[in-house]
Amino acid sequence: METRNSRMDPLWDPFVEFERLEEEFDRVFGLNRGLSGPGLLDRSITPALDLQERPEEFVVSAELPGLDLKDLNVTVTSNILTLSGTKREAQIPDKARLHRNELWEGEFRRTVSLPSPVNADSVTATLTDGILTVVLPKPEEAKPKRISITAR
């Protein structure tokens, strides 16, 4: 059987090579994820987030499904927001057989630079249905000001 392993070959696929490398790594170290286990590039342990800027505030929304409120930390300094915490492993009953294991667990830390400083004393954070929403009000001097115009 002829294998395609040359980068010059137009049918060479780097992702096939990643899969082969991952299988070899699992074999050498005695890992057994099964045929349907996650791939090398399949998961991330940092939460996805959105950053919106509104006239009077910034709003950050982060996906944190399955996270307990007690395991979550939100800090803000000047224009840096940091989300950190620990997502615990889901408990699997003793007689259950796990066929796929794609839910991530462990510690995470996500730092976001905001476009300008915020009023740290007025920041609020809520966790609803696995979505963390952090509202970061802008200081008065950073908010847009309407300038009145006079006619002559």
Image: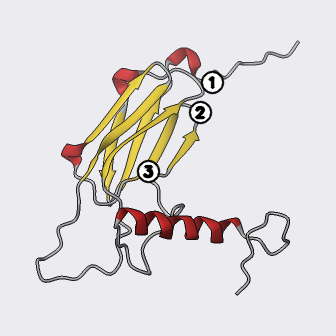
Residue at coordinates 79% horizontally, 15% vertically from top-left? 150
Query: Residue at left 35%, top 67%?
Result: 31
Q: Nearer the viewer, mark 3 or mark 1?
A: 3
- Look at the image and tell me in which quarter the C terminus lies: top right
Label for residue 41?
none
Disc 1 residue type?
Pro
Q: Quadrant of the N terminus?
A: bottom right
On residue 144, the disc is 1
Identify the residue at horizontal 37%, vertical 73% (top origin).
33
First-in-chain label (1 vs 2): 2
Residue assigned mark 3? 47
Q: Earlier in the sequence, mark 3 or mark 1?
A: 3
Is residue 148 visible in the rendered structure shown here?
A: yes
Contact between marks 1 and 2 (CB within 8 A): the answer is yes
Q: Which mark is residue 55?
A: 2
Classify mark 3: helix, strand or loop: loop
The residue furthest top is 152
* Picture coordinates of residue 30, whole percent (x, y): 34, 67
- Residue 43 lies, in percent from the top left, at 47, 60
Which amino acid is tagged 2?
A: Pro
